[in-house]
Image (cartoon, helix red, strand yellow):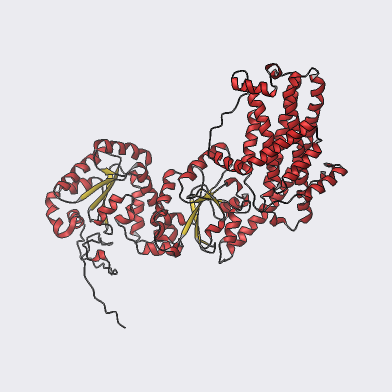
Amino acid sequence: MQSQGGSECLLPEHEDILMKKILQTHAPEEHQVDSASLLDLTERIFLNFAVSSVRKDCRSKEDAKIVNAVKELGITVHHMSCEMLQHISTDRPPKATTCVLLESLERHRWSTKLTIVLAALASSYGNYWLIARFCLTNPLALSLAAMKGQLRNSLKTTTILNYRLKALRYLLEKMVSVAKCVMAFEILPTNYVSQDYEALAMMKNQVHIASYWVIRSSVECASQITSTIASGVESNLQAKVTPQVWELWSLAKKISYIYEVLRNNFDAFSQQIEKKVHLRLVNLFAGVHDNNQDVLYTLFAQKDDFPLRDSCSQEKVGVNVLSNKVVMLFISSLNIYPEKLLLVVQQSEKKIHNRPEEEYEIVWIPAMFSAQEVERRVYDQVVDILPWYSITEPSNLSSSVMKFIKEVWHFQGDSMMVALDHGGNVSSLDAFDMVAIWGSKAYPFTTSKERELWEEQRWTMELLLDSIDPLFSYWMEERRIICLYGTNDLGWARELSKKMKALSEAGVPVELIYVGSNMQEQTSSTLTRIMEEKLSRYLSHVNIRIFWLRLQSMRSSRQRLGYASESDDSITQEIDSLLSSDTRSSGWLLVGEGASGEVLKLWGNQVLESLSNLHAWGQKIRRLGFLGALLKSLGTSATEPCDYSVVTPFSESSINGESSVCKKCKSIMEKHIMYQCGTC
C-alpha cells in the first residue's frame, strides 16, 4: 500500500523531538468512552453560530447519548477549558499549553483527546456568541456581556472582525474534520492490514501529528475568542487584529493540508480492509464452525466492541450475548411496511417456553443506511418498537458486509431473514417465510424443519388464522363454524350478512369474519362500509394486511420447496386461488369447523344460493355437521363410488367430530377406526 508523503514537513526538527516526548506520556486505558456523541454536539455548536440564524435542533434520542458522554467527560472538558484560559491570562506559549493539555489527557485515545479539547473550545465559543446574539434583547445576556466586557459598542462588527470570524470558523470546521477522521481510523479493524507495518506506522504517525496541531490550534482559537471580547475597548483595533487573522489562516491552511494527507491514507486503508473483510466473510460462510462468535464479530463488531442494542435494557452490548444461540438476521430497508414488521414481531413473540435449548435471538440489520437526518429519525422510530437486538450504529457496518449481504445472500431491498445456527453457519437464507407462517414452531429454522412442518399441515382454519386474534382461537377451540369472506362488492356482502344472521338465529354457531382481499386500497374502503353498517365481524386494517402477507409467505415457501410443481398440491392451489381472488367481481367464502377441520371454499352466487336453500339441507346439520350438510346441498358427492382413502395417526381431532374433505371428489369423508398390533 502506498502512503502519502509529506508528513515529515509537518513538524520542524525540534518539534519532532517534542512529539516523541509527548508520545511517551500517551498511555490510553483499556476502557474507552463513547466520545462520538460529544464531538457531534461540538460540531453542532460550531455550525449553529456559523450561519446568520440559529438552527432549531429538536431534542432527540441522541441527547441521551450526549448526556452519558458529558457525564463521563464533562469534568475533563471543564479542566481543559481552564487550562486554555490560564494560557491566555499568563501569556504562556501555545506550545507549552499544548503539552500541558496532552499530558493531562494521557489516559485517553487520540480521538477522545481531540474531542475533549474541541468541546472545551466550543464551550467558550458558544458562551461568547450566545451573549453576543441576545445581549440587545435579553437583560440577562446584557448583564453577562457587561460582566465579560462585551459592551454594546464592542459588539458592532467591523470589517476586520468579520475577517477574523471567517478565518476562525473555517479553522474550526477543518479541526472537526480531522477529529472525525482520527476517530474513524481508530475504529478500523487494522488487524486486517497488520502485515503492512510501514504503512500502518506512517498512518499512526500522521494521527499523532494531526492531533498535536488540532490541539495547538484550539489553544490559539481560545486566545482569539478572548481577544475578540476585549477588542471593542482597544483603540488600535486593526493593528492588533490583522496579525491574528493571518495566524488563523496560516493554521487553517496547515490543518487543511494535514486533513487531506490523513484522509487519503485513511481511504487507502479502508479500501484494503474492505477487500479483506469480504474475502474473510466468504471463507467464514464456506466453512463449518462450532461457535458463532467469529462470524458475528466479522459481521458486526469490527469497528465497535459493543455493536448491538439490547431492546430490554437499552444498553450497548457485544456479540458475546449471542454466543451458542440460533441467530436470526432480519435484514430490511428503512421503508419496510409496518405490517410486515408487526407480523415478524407477533410471530417471534410466541417463543417456546421452558425450552432453553431452543433459544434464539433476532438481530435487525437496517440496510442501505446513509446516516442522513431523515433516515436517522426513521431508524430511531423503528428501533423503539422492536423487541429484538438491533445494530446500534448502522453507519458503522462495513461496506463489505453490506456488499456480501447483497451479492451472496441476494438482498434486493425487500425484507429477508437469514438463520444462523449455534455455530454461525447459515441454516436458511429464507427463514422469513417460516417465521411468518409458524413463528417459533419452525425452530431451528432449517429447510428440513420447514418441509417437516408442511408435511404435517392440512388446509385448515388454524393454518389460515394462526391466532391472529385470541378470540378466533377461542371460537376454534369451541368448534364453532368459522366463515372467512372477502369481497369488494357491498351488495354481495349485505346479502351474505343477512343470510348468515338467519343461520345464526336458527341456532347454528357460526361466525362471519371479513378478511378483505389482496387489493389493499379497495379493501380499505369496503372495510369502512362494513364497519359502519355492522355487516359482520372483521379483521382490523393491520391484521388484514398480516393475513395476506402470511398467505404470500405460504406460497413462497411451498414454491421454494417444490410443492407447487406437484399436480395434487391442493394447499398451494387453494393459496393461489385466494391470492388471485381480487380479480373476481363478487366474493368468496371459506367455511371451516374448529381449528383442524378441513376448509370448504365457495364463490360468488354459489354462496348465496346455498344459504338460500337452508330449509332444504338444514335438517342434515345434526347428522352430517354444517360442512357436510353444505357439501351435500352443493351436490359435490361423486356420481360413482370414490376409492380415495387416507390413514392418519391418532389425534384428538380423530374422535371430536372434526371432518375431512376428500381430495379427489371433495365430499366429506367417512371415519373408520383401525386397530393395529404394535408388537413385532
Q: Quadrant of residue 354?
A: bottom left
Position of residue 660 in the picture relative to residue 262 (left or right): left
Does any portion of residue 46 appear in the rendered image?
A: yes
Position of residue 636 in the picture relative to residue 462 (left or right): left
Residue at (59%, 18%) from the top-left corner? 137
Q: Residue furthest right?
A: 13
Residue 563, position as x, y percentages in the image: 40, 60
Q: Residue furthest bottom?
A: 680
Residue at (23%, 48%) from the top-left corner? 511
- Image quarter of the C terminus: bottom left
Does any portion of residue 260 appear in the rendered image?
A: no
Nearer to me, 183 or 451:
183
Nearer to me, 146 or 333:
146
Residue 136, position as x, y percentages in the image: 62, 18
Nearer to me, 356 or 98:
98
Residue 315, position as x, y percentages in the image: 53, 49
Residue 109, position as x, y percentages in the image: 70, 48
Q: Quadrant of residue 622?
A: bottom left
Instruction: Tell me: residue 486, above or below residue 254.
Output: below
Q: Quadrant of residue 661?
A: bottom left
